[in-house]
Amino acid sequence: MFGFRFGPPKFSLGVDIGSSALKYVMLKKGKTGPEVVAAGIEAYPEGVFVDGIMQDPNAISQMIKNIKKEQNLKFEQVFTSIASQNTILCFLPLPEMEDEELKHAIEGEAEQYVPYPLETVNLNFARLAKVEQDGTSRLLCLLAVAQKEQVESIVGIFRSVGVKQLDALDIDSLAIINSLEKFMKRKSGAGDEAIAEEGDEPMGTMSGVGPSGDIGDDEVVAIVCIGARSTIINVLKGHVLRFSRNVQISGNNITEVIRSVYKFTFTEAETTKIEKSVASVQGEVDQEFLDVVHTTIEEIAGEIRRSFDYFKAQHREPLIHRVILTGGTAKIKDIDKLLSSELSVEVVLGDPSIGLIRSLPSEDAFIENLQQYSVAIGLALRGVEAND
């Protein structure tokens, strides 16, 4: 068999190379909607990531090879992402112009925002919306920048497992938005294609950041993803991304506090955090543990509040209307209620599985870890949406 495929692709695979674990979700396109047919979370061997930096891409390649074989993954369409802390995102108000002019204008603007030689980076842009600035109509664009060395490292991982070319290399913060669009009762937005020289690998088309759907024009919604090593804060106004920030206080800070209080190793503390969080949700509450955890959650809330204050001052917005919470740390009992109290705004847990049919050997495991799949789901949806 030569592996030819006749007709459009049926499967879309999203692979999230996180700093603490590799997450994957495979969707199958069906008549009744996209179907989750494979999903999993695989912890890295020791030393693969150190202080959030990838040290052993070959180990990740081997993990993907093993998972492909064990789970019968299809590489018809493959999407992955680069961590937002390794990228630069800038919001640029520019005069309205044609795409080719806009490309050159953004490349010119990039020089003042990028602290690296432009020949060493990949640039992408997306049209977001028309905005009023000092009485003048402007075109708000999102500029995304990633160093080519980091892009090539990720692309190399997939080439080594037989993926000749990724369908897109996105940014995790944008994939999160994509995963929660149906939860926000929105349709998918359309972004412009990546800026890339001939032969360059794609770095994502930024779907889900532009206008569409039925969120009110004056409504400001924040999507907060509390991961292992960082917290991603996206703020959208009227369904358009207006602000994105990455802060370095997150789930691992909670683990460190548990390690310090209980005199555990980091691994023991991480295991305790997961087990007691699950037990709390199931009704077995350890109040001492929750008190320890809540101290750090209050610190995370402080960083989120400072980001909100900066956004409101910069954009002259009086308030954030609601917060949608996701990420692995979101499974801690009552974290939504605690953040809501600290931020004085409604906080709800996001559900990235809205609209997805599930056909998995263990649906309970998928649901239990649902918040950790936001990036992978958002990536996999790119393939489904592209073929609708």
Image (cartoon, rainbow, N blue to C red):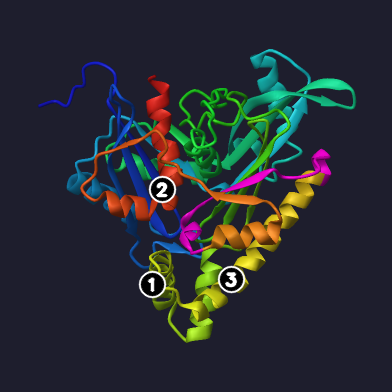
Q: Is 73 rendered above or below residue 67?
A: above
Q: Is residue 254 above or below residue 36?
A: below
Mark 3: which amino acid?
A: His
Is the residue 175 above or below the residue 208 in the image? below
Where disc 1 sits, the SS reads helix
| Mark 1 or 3, nearer chain start | 1
Label located before the other in sequence (1 or 2):
1
Residue segment shown in magenta: 313-333
Q: Quadrant of the C terminus?
A: top left
Q: Could you tell me how far apart the alpha carbons at marks 1 and 2 are, in whole angstroms?
A: 19 Å
Query: Whole-percent x and y of residue 330?
Result: 50, 57
The residue lying toward the viewer, choosing from 217 and 29, is 217
Amino acid type, label 1: Thr
Q: CA distance from mark 3 to mark 2?
A: 24 Å
Report the front residue among 95 and 198.
95
Residue 39: percent from left, percent from top:
30, 46
Kindly identify which residue carries mark 3.
294
At mark 2, the secondary structure is helix
Q: Residues within 10 Å of mark 1 (few under 14, many from 20)?
A: few
